Amino acid sequence: MAAKRLVISGRVQGVGFRHWITREAGRLGVSGWVRNRRDGRVEVLVDGDTASVEELLRLCRLGPRLAEVTEIVEELVDTCPDPGFRSLPTI
């Protein structure tokens, strides 16, 4: 199992990124959350088997059709205590 926190920069707000990543996370069977940040970035916590977490990270580099990802900062974190994947309010 692997858990990572991602902070994604670029044109990632207003392009359906949260909805898209929630759908992709569900398809991959990972847990965690996604939220917009007031600084224009998107923050993600993803937890699951290593292959699925790495696949979601690969997909995040591409983003949804209208997104333009310029940078992803990632760090290993403790596992997510809640099952499922959800969208949280902006911080």
Image: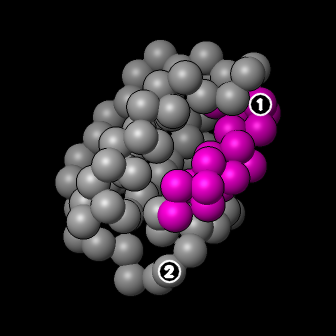
- Point out which mark residue 15 bears: 1
Start and end of the magenta stretch? 12-29
Q: Is residue 13 magenta?
A: yes
At label 1, which amino acid type do we have? Val
Along the line of sight, the residue nearer the viewer: 59 or 39? 59
Residue at 32 percent of width and 49 percent of height? 51
Question: Of helix, strand and loop, which one carries label 1?
Answer: loop
Expressed as whole percent of the image width and height from the top left, the position of residue 65 reads 73, 22
- Disc number lying in front (1 or 2): 2
Name the quarter where the C terminus is drawn: bottom right
In this rendering, the answer to whether 73 lies above or below 90 is above
Magenta stretch holds residue 33: no
Viewport quadrant of the N terminus: bottom left
Q: Which mark identifies residue 83?
A: 2
- Give the distance between the C-alpha atoms of the residues marked 1 and 2, in whole angstroms: 26 Å
Q: Quadrant of residue 22?
A: bottom right
Q: Quadrant of residue 54?
A: top left
Measuring from the top left, give residue 69's x and y in whole percent. 53, 21
- The answer to whether 50 is drawn above or below residue 11 in the figure is below
* Count of numbered marks: 2
Horizontal and vertical percent for residue 89? Answer: 67, 63
Q: Nearer the viewer, residue 75 or 65?
A: 65
User: Residue at 77% of width from left, 38% of height from top?
Assistant: 16
**Could you tell me which residue is drawn at 43 percent across and 58 percent down?**
45
| 10 Å crowding of disc 2: few (<14), some (14-19), many (20+) | few
On the question of residue 14 being in view, the answer is yes
Q: Is residue 36 visible?
A: no
In which quadrant of the rendered view does residue 85 lie?
A: bottom right
Query: Is 87 placed left or right of 82 in the picture?
Result: right
Q: Residues within 10 Å of mark 1 (few under 14, many from 20)?
A: some
Badge 2 amino acid: Pro
User: Does residue 45 appear left or right of residue 27 in this picture?
Assistant: left
